[in-house]
Image (tube, rainbow, N blue to C red):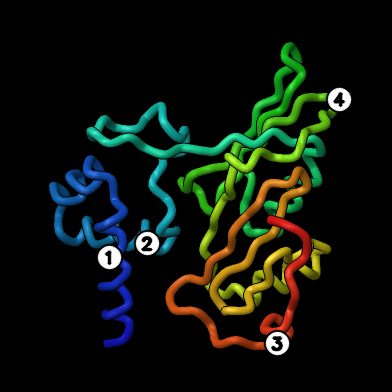
Amino acid sequence: APHTAAMSAASARIALATPPALAARLRRASPARAVRSKTDVAMRSISSYLPADTYNSLEKDGDLTFLHTMLRVDDLEKTMAFFSALGLKETRRKESEKGKFTLVFMASAPGAPEIELTHNWGGETFAPPSRSMGHLAYATDDIYALCRKLQDAGIVINRPPRDGKMAFVKSPDGISVELLQKGTPLEPEEPWASAENVGEW
């Protein structure tokens, strides 16, 4: 019974997140196939709604579809290590000899919205990010575990998760990233409950 309830909840979440065109295809499929298709998507990630080529094969469904956020980076490897520590994976990249740049796309799961890391060869020096650029945000199953992992990787927790719900870190180029606990907040616990803020975010 608990397994059935969990699958029903996952199916309900997928029904909300599934694009209309895909939902229509699932409805036209046999009931057994539709259930398998929804379950496969649920098991992969609730965030996954984009095809492998992100937009070239997207069906027209009347909606505006979010694809990615582009971030310019100075040290590509260092920035990739930061986002890898968060849990993102490289999905694709493009090298341009003519333009002398590299584009690396990373996402939390295949088919999830991406960040596009743009690195101009030779490096760049950036002014502090404008306050008009607020932050990226990701939700995690266990905010304490993720913050411990980041801290062990040498990443400063600028705003510790004292409330068991929210934390902030910054990328090597100063981009703020908000981390949020999925579901209800965790019970406050040390060392986070008494941890002080570090710098700005």
Disc 4: which residue: 122
Measuring 20% from the left and 50% from the top, which residue is drawn there? 26
The residue tagged with tag 2: helix, strand or loop?
helix
Number of numbered discs present? Answer: 4
Give the residue type at disc 1.
Ser
Q: State the residue in front, 199 or 164.
A: 199
Measuring 65% from the left and 70% from the top, which residue is drawn there? 146
Real-space CA distance between mark 4 and mark 3, rounded to the nearest whole angstrom: 43 Å
The residue tagged with tag 3: helix, strand or loop?
loop
Give the residue type at disc 2.
Ala
Callouts 2 and 4 close, C-beta under 8 Å? no
Disc sitting over residue 190 in the figure: 3
Q: State the residue in front, 173 or 27.
A: 173
Disc 2: which residue: 42
Disc 1: which residue: 11
| Residue 39, position as x, y percentages in the image | 32, 63
Quadrant in which the C terminus is drawn:
bottom right
For label 3, the crowd category at 10 Å Cα-Cα, with few meaning under 14, some 14 to 19 and many 20 or more, is few
Measuring 59% from the left and 59% from the top, which residue is drawn there? 178
Give the residue type at disc 4.
Gly
Q: Earlier in the sequence, mark 4 or mark 3?
A: 4
- Mark nearest the camera among 2 and 4 is 4
Taking 23 as reference, is 75 above or below it?
Answer: above
